Image (cartoon, helix red, strand yellow):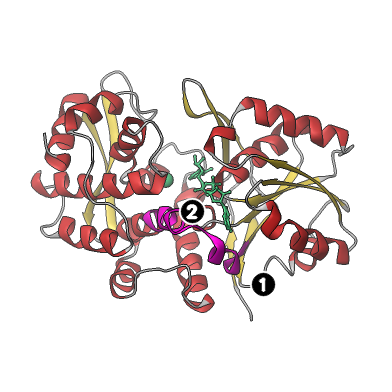
């Protein structure tokens, strides 16, 4: 079956995202013409390795690409400097050179860590993303951001590095836990609210499911990558427009933090998206009825619409948001389905918006 290709062209290096149901089996064919040498290093986690590592390695071997690998314990708890250090040592032990390529096989945690390892090793070698979660396909593998968490907060140590290519194989989604798949759906819904009312209507009519046919998944995923492309091409370093991609995230991050990071990122974003829509509607910033429409689509994807934490608890965490300064924060606000804007508000106004969106 053929797939879709989305070309991403930020100023620091363009690349293709290939979305197909056979990208993994054809990885060698896709990558052989692109890699600077036949030496590669696959980074993956302990859940993904038993499922897909052999398939990737065999496909690369068929094209003469020799790939050593490292496997780290799955989960956000591994996304730290200690794991990064282990990975860099493993890369050195495998005698990677400046012309070797790191291949990230896994979800957003793997992509973020492998990208940063590639950015640091010998001051930067090339890397490829093979995302295996919906979130990684539609969000984290595109845009060039990579980071690890510090004790002080998430994603605090990172870099920008564009991949050589992204190979998104939709068949890998079938083995995801439902909750992890739903996490990715939250970013898909966010993209639709932000920039594509047609996609929103499609999602309302036919909520995404990991067992959907590959053609449907491929089309929706490629559409999402196209949306993210528009923002990251226009604003590679997140100085303006790209901040719109934070829609639902300012309140979402507070929910995530209030849960002690036990709630999945997408689940928290879903709550944040509904909350900011309710608040924006009440404040007259967004069209009437928008919150109800978003809530319906969020719920249809098995995601929560209400915060389990009261506004006052979230307000404390919201002040710590990385996107804030001493006085206030730049919020992404939905205007109507398919359109959003940035609005700088004081902390007082933000706290009021949280109360309106979440309930006191
Ligand atoms: N760099 C960016 O621009 C960016 C954007 C958004 C999110 N992120 C980061 O992404 C991370 C979240 O990504 P995620 O939700 O993919 O998390 P993840 O990588 O931890 O994957 C979630 C879980 O699914 C498992 N898994 C992955 N693929 C699988 C498959 N095909 N079958 C079965 N299990 C599979 C993983 O082992 C893990 O347990 C966060 O760390 C977040 O900060 C980065
Ligand atoms: Zn997100």
Q: Nearer the viewer, residue 293 or 12?
A: 293
Is residue 285 shown left or right of residue 294? left
Label whose residue precedes the other's in the sequence (1 or 2): 1
Q: Mark 2 near ligand 1 (CB under 8 Å)? A: yes
Given the current orientation, which residue lies at the most extreme top position?
Answer: 326
| Mark 1 secondary-structure assignment | loop
The residue under label 1 is 22
* Res 341 visible: no
Q: Position of residue 94 (x, y in %)?
A: 87, 38
Q: Read off the magenta span.
A: 168-187
Q: Is residue 211 above or below residue 269?
A: below
Task: Judge whether residue 53 can be spotted in this image.
Answer: yes
Q: Magenta stretch containing residue 237, yes or no?
A: no
In the image, which disc is placed on residue 135?
Answer: 2
Q: Disc 1 vs disc 2: Cβ atoms closer than 8 Å?
A: no
When asked about the image quadrant of residue 27, the answer is: bottom right
**Of the pair 72 and 36, the residue shown nearer to us:** 72
Residue sitting at x 23%, y 51%:
305
Q: Position of residue 100 (x, y in %)?
A: 83, 45
Determine the image quadrant of residue 21.
bottom right
Q: Quadrant of ligand 2?
A: top left
Eyeballing the image, is 304 above or below 263?
A: below
Relative to 293, residue 101 above or below: above
Query: Where residue 191 appears, x then y in whole percent?
Result: 37, 57
* Helix, strand or loop status at disc 2: helix
Q: Residue at x 57, y 42 (%)?
A: 109
For the C terminus, the image quarter is top left
């Amino acid at each position: 079956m053929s797939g879709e290709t989305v070309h991403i062209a930020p100023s620091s290096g363009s690349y293709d995202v290939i979305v197909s149901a056979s990208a993994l089996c054809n990885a060698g064919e896709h990558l052989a013409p692109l890699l600077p040498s036949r030496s590669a290093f696959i980074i993956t986690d302990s859940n993904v390795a038993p499922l897909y590592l052999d398939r990737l390695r065999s496909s690369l071997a068929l094209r003469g690409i020799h790939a050593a690998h490292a496997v780290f314990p799955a989960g956000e708890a591994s996304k730290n400097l200690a794991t990064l250090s282990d990975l860099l040592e493993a890369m050195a032990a495998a005698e990677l050179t400046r012309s070797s390529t790191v291949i990230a096989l896994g979800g957003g945690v793997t992509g973020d860590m492998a990208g940063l390892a590639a950015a640091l090793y010998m001051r930067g070698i090339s890397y490829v993303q093979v995302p295996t979660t919906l979130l990684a396909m539609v969000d984290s593998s595109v845009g060039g951001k990579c980071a690890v968490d510090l004790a002080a907060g998430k994603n605090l140590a990172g870099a920008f590095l564009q991949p050589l290519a992204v190979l998104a194989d939709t068949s890998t989604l079938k083995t995801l836990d439902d909750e992890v798949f739903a996490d990715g759906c939250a970013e898909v819904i966010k993209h639709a609210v932000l920039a594509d009312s047609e996609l929103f209507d499609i999602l309302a009519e036919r909520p995404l499911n990991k067992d959907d046919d590959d053609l449907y998944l491929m089309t929706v995923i490629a559409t999402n990558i196209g949306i993210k492309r528009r923002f990251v091409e226009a604003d590679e370093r997140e100085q303006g427009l790209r901040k719109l991609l934070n829609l639902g995230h300012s309140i979402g991050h507070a929910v995530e933090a209030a849960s002690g990071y036990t709630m999945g990122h997408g689940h928290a974003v879903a709550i944040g998206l509904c909350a900011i829509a309710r608040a924006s509607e009440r404040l007259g910033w967004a069209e009437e009825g928008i919150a109800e429409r978003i809530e319906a689509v969020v719920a249809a994807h098995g995601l929560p619409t209400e915060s389990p934490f009261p506004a006052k608890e979230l307000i404390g965490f919201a002040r710590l948001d990385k996107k804030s300064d001493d006085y206030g924060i730049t919020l992404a606000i939905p205007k109507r389905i398919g359109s959003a804007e940035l609005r700088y508000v004081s902390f007082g106004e933000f706290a009021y918006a949280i109360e309106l969106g979440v309930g006191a």
